Image (spheres, rainbow, N blue to C red):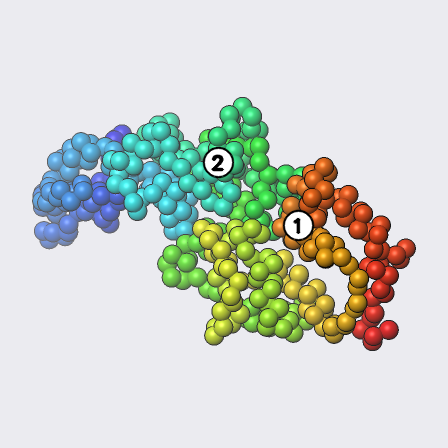
Amino acid sequence: MEDAQLDAFVAAAEDGVDCDGLVAARRSGGDGQNEAAGEYVFAVDGDRRDNLDESTFRSLASDHSSYGGNWYFWERGVPPGDDRVAFLRWLEGTDTTQLPERLDRLESGVHATWGQLHVTVSLDPDGDAGEYSRQYALCHADDVTSDGADLTEYHDPLDARELSKLDEDGRYRPLKTAPTLQRGWHFPDLGPHELVRAVECFYPATIPNWYREGEGDLDIDNWRDTAERQTGIYEVVEELPREAVEWVAQACCVDSQCLKRREWEYDDDEELAAPAGDGEFPCREPCSLVVAAARKWTILEGESERTYEFELTPSEKNQLEELIDAVADGRVDDVREADVGDGANRYRARYLRAKRFDEDGNLCGVETTNGDGE
Ligand code: SF4
């Protein structure tokens, strides 16, 4: 440990140190004014020495500099906030790996994923918080095997805001936690503060909510709470039928559409049957995208059902079902033009339209009746 780190460690022992197997304390003793020698405690991985004078205490700390240097990083090198520190510790597996093994692994890099983000944690001997500082590399999880040269390099964590705005095809992403993050970028050398800032840009509020959940302190607003709180044009969502809330969750909140794990339910007494998802970070309330979509569905659910009669061949009926599936699963762009066996093939769809739509776009020439049946 450098002298400055050692001084900081001795000073910290006044309040007690307990970090990754390193324990240090200074016992109050004597008359409180002239503390007697032999008052420090030092322990590493349970090997404890009591009644140490300051010189011996310093010497032991120097002998275990990896523990002290690691403590210094967590004391001085990380951003403020229990949630952020917990996140950084989770990234490198502090709960599951003892310090010596962890430091070995950090030499080559410890990996973790957070949604579609891939984080590699390694030691940074030149870091601001001493030789046990950490450095973080961040990229899209699907780009892990890419050569860094194929990826565009970024260093400012706020660039994550721009990267998270559009998907691979340049379309706006209204939901930050949708699994549509674009690829092709990397941040090779972020410090702890910058890493947290970048993650917060990609996935806002995921770190504090994940932390609160771990502490048993996640404040959940169920559907009914959220719906009753809406005002203005969204007030109507309170009228969405119970079974339609189920369809909303199935449409929007499953893993294929959102990486958050839905923790909200219909209300305190009724759970939703829709899968909640397996995401690392929780969703504590219906988001604005879901509320906006639910407004539309509430209006649509206000219509009464009508009976229409269409004449279709069995294959045509199947094709309509395949088309809806393809759109719902977002695979329309994957259907090859040559694959006319797929009901969502563009030529198949055009053929069906040519055959079954009239000049006004009515399926089988059957007009859509309005709410009054006219
Ligand atoms: S409400 Fe659903 S779609 Fe919105 S963030 Fe939560 S889980 Fe995702």
* Quarter location, residue 248: bottom right
Residue 68 visible in this rendered orientation of the protein = no
Task: Identify which residue is drawn at 40% across, 47% down.
Answer: 87
Q: Find the residue positioned furthest to the right.
A: 359
- The foreground one among 208 and 297 is 297
- How packed is label 1: few (under 14 Cα within 10 Å), some, or many (20 or more)? some
- The foreground one among 297 and 328 is 328
Give the alpha-carbon distance from disc 2 to disc 1, as whole Å.
Answer: 33 Å
- The foreground one among 146 and 216 is 146
Q: Is residue 137 left or right of residue 22?
A: right
Q: Is residue 357 left or right of residue 84?
A: right
Task: Identify which residue is drawn at 83% across, 75% down.
Answer: 373
Q: What residue would you read off at disc 1?
A: 326
* Quarter location, residue 135: top left
Task: Identify which residue is drawn at 30% across, 47% down.
Answer: 95
Q: Is residue 250 above or below residue 51?
A: below
Q: Is residue 357 left or right of residue 213?
A: right
* Position in image of residue 250 (x %, y %): 57, 60
Q: What residue would you read off at disc 2?
A: 138
Badge 1 marks a residue whose secondary structure is helix
* Position in image of residue 238 (x %, y %): 63, 72
Q: Is residue 351 above or below residue 131?
A: below
- Confirm or reject: label 1 Cβ below 8 Å from ligand 1: no
Q: Quadrant of the C terminus?
A: bottom right
Q: Quadrant of the N terminus?
A: top left
* Position in image of residue 16 (x %, y %): 23, 48
Mark 2 or mark 1, earlier in chain: 2
The amino acid pointed to by label 1 is Ala
Q: Find the residue positioned furthest to the top.
A: 149
- Confirm or reject: label 2 Cβ below 8 Å from ligand 1: no
Task: Identify which residue is drawn at 46% across, 33% down.
Answer: 137
